[in-house]
Each structure stands twice: as structure tokens, then as C-alpha cells.
Image (cartoon, grey):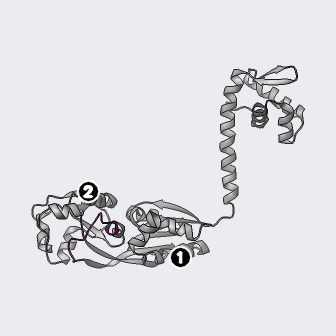
Amino acid sequence: MRRLPSLDALVPFEAAARLLNFTAAARELNISQSAVSQQIRNLEASLGVALFERVGRSVRLTQVGKEYQHTVAAALGHIGNATAEIRSARGRPKVTLAADQSIAWLWLMPRLPLFQELIPDVAVRLLVSDVESDCVNDANDLAIVHGDGSWPGHHARRIFAEEVYPVCSPSYLETGPPLDSVDDIYRHVLLHLEDEHWNWMNWRMWLTECGASLPTEDRGLAINNYPLVVEAAKRGQGLALGWNHLVDLEIAAGTLVRPLAESVRTRFGYHAVWPSSRERLPQTEWLCDWLLQAADLPGEAVTRRTV
């Protein structure tokens, strides 16, 4: 604070520097001309330099004054913009939505503009974390999380059930080994998700459910981020497990294909979760209802509306 001048003097200085006229600055600020002159004298005294040259009844900036004007004008402009933003947002409904990286990146972000178009007066604050406790807590109005629908102290509504199947790029399917059945998977490079969550499907679980086993010599690639697993599959680096709804836009766009008809359904899925201890605000209700409706939108419809 010792490095700052009197903040009361900066506004008169900026106006006088911009208008190069103390009287015009006083008129703009609705104060007296003598008050403007006094504030600028005080500012010059505190800085130890002259900011204006008095030439008769007119003034002009010194070189130091010109340089100082640039900084002060920019700083006051930022403060003014921030203040206007706060005032315009005052009273605007807000909702804090938390989600893990997979659903936030692959499912929510392409669809969120549709909600903002439908209900533009609601401000959404999105928090993204793969740590469940960051998402499911009393500080967040709503969360989208993967699980079985049971979170102590919270209500939950299932957005969509879990269905998992292999996906790959069209080029990989054309140039890779034959893939006519689940038994052919042992020939292929498998893209693995390394994840701490026990209830996320992996290749061993998926193959076991389909009556097969993981290849003895796995030539796969392990990645600890599911959106990157999807990206690797799109680039033709191997076979990945695709979660229904998380990869539907890629399938609709043709960047990923389902090489096999087999899929595995589980008792898990993605749910909208909110604290039972908090009153549910209208904007939270609107967003929750919209999330359930958005789950029924086909990938083609989302791609068409957001391109």
C-alpha cells in the first residue's frame, strides 16, 4: 500500500490527462475545478514529479505524465469493467456444477451451449475433478458423477446407464489385423485406462464378461486420462473401450467406429447428485432436468447444433 498514491487523485488525473482541461475534467466528474487542481497537485507532490505543464490557461502532459496516464487509464478501465460485470450479474441465478474430466470433456462441454441457449439467464460455474469428494460435497449445487446411485447425504437421479464396447478409428480397422469376433481381440493393441476408481470397466473385466481373456502378451498403451484414451483411439493407435454417451459424438462424426456388436451393461452409470441438506434452488432444478433431457439427444443432433 505504501507504493500506491492516493486513490482519490487517480480519477481526476485520468480525466484531466484525457481531456487536457481541468475545467472539463471537473464537469465530467461533477466536482469543482479547484478540487481537480488540488488532487493533481497532491498527486504530483506524492510522486515528486510534475505530470502537467501549465502553459497559460491550458495544460499539457509531461513525458512522465504521458507514461503514467497509460498505466492509470488501463488500471481504471479494468476496475470499471470488473465493477460493471459484478453489477450486471447481481441477482442473476447461478449454479455450481461439478463433474469428472471424462464426462465434462466428452459429454457436457459439447452440450452445455444448448443449455445456455435455452436458459441464458442462469450462470453456470463448472468445476472439474476426478476426485469424487471434490464433486460430491455440500459446496456444489449439483454434480455429475459415475457410480451406482448411492451417495450418503445426497440425492441422485441417473442420467444414463453404463454400456461399454470396443471402439477404434476407421483407419485402424482397415489396416489392423482381422477383427470379426471378441476372440480376435488378442491380436490387437489395446488402449488401457489407468484409473483409481474400482467401478470403471477395464479390458480384463470387459473380456471376462464376454467370455474371453486378456491376451497373454499385451502390446497395449496405458493412459491415466480417459479423454486421451479416446484421442489415441481416434489417431489409430489401437482399440479402446468406449462408454456409451461419452463417445457418441465421435461415432456420429465417423472418427470412431464400433468394430464389434458386443457390449457390456453394468449396474453403474452417470448420475446427477445434489446435497440432501440444502434447499434445491430453481436454477439447480432447471439444470438437473436439462441434463436428463440432454442424455436423450442423439449425437448427430448435438453435433449439428454446436458446429
Report whether 197 appears left or right of 166.
right
* Residue pictured at 51% horizontal, 68% vertical: 114
Residue, x 47% and y 69% (percent of image)? 143
In this view, the residue in front, 193 or 31, is 31
Q: Is residue 294 left or right of residue 25?
A: left
Question: Label for residue 304?
Answer: none
Picture layout, residue 167 above or below residue 86: below
Residue with the mark numbered 2: 235
Query: Looking at the picture, how far across and down is residue 149, in whole percent?
Result: 41, 78
Question: Is the magenta region chiefly helix, strand or loop?
Answer: loop
- Residues 105 and 146: in front is 105
Q: Quadrant of residue 5?
A: top right
Residue 154 placed where, x, y %?
Answer: 49, 75
- Residue 6 location, x and y as percent? 75, 33
Are the residues flagged by discs 1 and 2 in contact, CB closer than 8 Å?
no
Q: Residue at x 48, y 64 (%)?
A: 98
Residue 256 shown in magenta:
yes
Residue carrying label 1: 276
Q: Is residue 281 visible?
A: no
Q: Is residue 223 above or below residue 269?
A: above
- The quarter in which the N terminus is drawn is top right
Residue 288 showing in the rendered view? yes
- State which tag comes first along the sequence, 1 or 2: 2
Could you tell me residue 90's position as x and y percent?
69, 60
Range of the magenta residues? 251-260
Is residue 110 toward the left or the right of residue 183 in the image? right
User: Label 1 sits on what residue type?
Assistant: Ser
